[in-house]
């Protein structure tokens, strides 16, 4: 907390300097007082977010957030940040290189650069994805999912408790939990439109899966992977196509085989996808980047939903598709 104590000790001096400057300006200019810039760092201190401020100082991010922005900052409360540091066993005053890199990336995962989002903007959008300043595989910016059906929530875990703390260079929204680096599982479980995919992964895990699906997509050290994630409507259409009533009408080995055709063993963003064969963990499918489609070995075409691509996590990237990819029929 050295940064905070130094800051408070300097405040009387700063107020004196500002007062003298103001008087000087008044002497030179009779048009009225000059408006002073207030950065998101100032607003964090005004709202007693001392743990966040100390972490920003320890990682050298103060000067970044004193820049022009604009910034949207989801700022953890003191209790939230203390809990994070305790669970991570990190001492801000004695960090290893790896710990500093982790804390820096976690802090950046709370910052949206270039967009000043008010709570009303998020509520109007209802839900969606945006990028944070944190980075993952191939130095790609991580994604953030917000939803507003039950208050403003971030990645399905952090709730905005005190919104719209405005500064000259952005806005702070205070949240009750540190927004940890997201995994593929984070985005699959936070977005209700992907709930049947989560059910399929869970069901496959009850059998003899090629990989333990839920554990793998939840592991921030796994991968990276690219997941072509069927939306709920895609699974509903598949059940109708196969004349089934539930996923559990299929055996777990079949579900495992289906899931493998949706996973690539590399982090492939949409602008890196090329027309031609794409090697999944199950086998080859064909991509056509002229119309953003995937075709399985049965000739069935899945559209990649262009508004739901490049959902980047720490262990891979998700592209949502509108039809389930199927393996070729078994050869007798």
Image (cartoon, grey):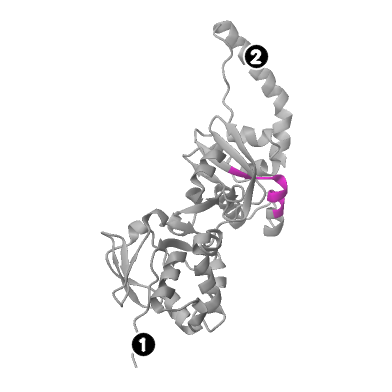
Judge from the rendering whether residue 21 lies leftward or rightward of residue 117; answer left or right.
right
Q: Main secondary structure of the magenta part?
A: helix
Residue range (magenta): 74-83
Residue 12 at what x, y percent from top left? 72, 23
Residue 231 appearing in the image: no
Q: Mark 2 and mark 1: span between their CA atoms?
A: 83 Å
Residue 260 at what x, y percent from top left? 43, 76
Residue 101 drawn above or below residue 235: above
Residue 310 at what x, y percent from top left? 42, 57
- Identify residue for label 1: 330
Q: Residue at x 54, y 83 (%)?
A: 207
10 Å neighbourhood of mark 2: few (<14), some, or many (≥20)?
A: few
> If the image is split into quadrants, where does the N terminus sit?
top right
- Residue 246 is a magenta residue: no
- Identify residue for label 2: 20
Q: Which badge, 2 or 1, is on the more N-terminal residue? A: 2
Q: Residue at x 60, y 39 (%)?
A: 172
Find numbered disc 2 in the image and state the secondary structure of the residue it sits on: helix
Residue 25 at what x, y percent from top left? 58, 11
Find numbered disc 1 in the image and state the secondary structure of the residue it sits on: loop
Q: Residue at x 57, y 10 (%)?
A: 32
């Amino acid at each position: 907390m050295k940064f905070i104590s130094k800051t408070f000790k300097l405040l009387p001096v700063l107020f004196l300097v500002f007062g003298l400057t103001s008087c000087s300006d008044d002497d030179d200019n009779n048009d009225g007082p000059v408006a002073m810039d207030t950065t998101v760092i100032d607003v964090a201190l005004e709202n007693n977010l001392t743990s966040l401020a100390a972490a920003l100082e320890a990682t050298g991010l103060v000067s970044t957030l004193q820049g022009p922005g604009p910034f949207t900052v989801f700022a953890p409360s003191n209790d939230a940040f203390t809990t994070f540091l305790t669970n991570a066993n990190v001492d801000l005053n004695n960090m290893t290189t790896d710990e500093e890199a982790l804390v820096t990336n976690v802090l950046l995962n709370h910052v949206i650069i270039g967009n000043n989002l008010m709570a009303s903007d998020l509520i109007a959008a209802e839900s969606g994805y945006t990028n944070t300043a944190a980075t993952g595989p191939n130095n790609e910016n991580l994604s953030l999912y917000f939803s507003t059906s039950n208050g403003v929530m971030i990645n399905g875990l952090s709730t905005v408790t005190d919104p719209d703390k405005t500064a000259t260079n952005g806005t702070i929204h205070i949240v009750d939990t540190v927004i940890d680096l997201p995994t593929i599982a984070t985005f699959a479980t936070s977005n209700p439109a992907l709930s049947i995919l989560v059910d399929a992964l869970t069901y496959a895990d009850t059998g003899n899966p090629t990989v333990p699906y839920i554990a793998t997509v939840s592991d921030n050290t796994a991968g990276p992977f690219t997941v072509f994630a069927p939306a709920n409507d895609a699974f509903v259409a598949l059940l109708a196509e196969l004349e089934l009533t539930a996923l559990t009408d299929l055996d777990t080995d079949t579900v495992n085989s289906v899931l493998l055709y949706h996973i690539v063993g590399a982090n492939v963003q949409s602008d890196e996808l090329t027309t031609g064969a794409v090697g999944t963990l199950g086998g080859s499918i064909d991509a056509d980047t002229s119309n953003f489609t995937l075709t399985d070995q049965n000739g069935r075409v899945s559209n990649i939903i262009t508004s739901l691509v490049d959902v980047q996590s720490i262990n891979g990237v998700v592209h949502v598709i509108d039809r389930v990819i199927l393996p070729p029929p078994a050869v007798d």
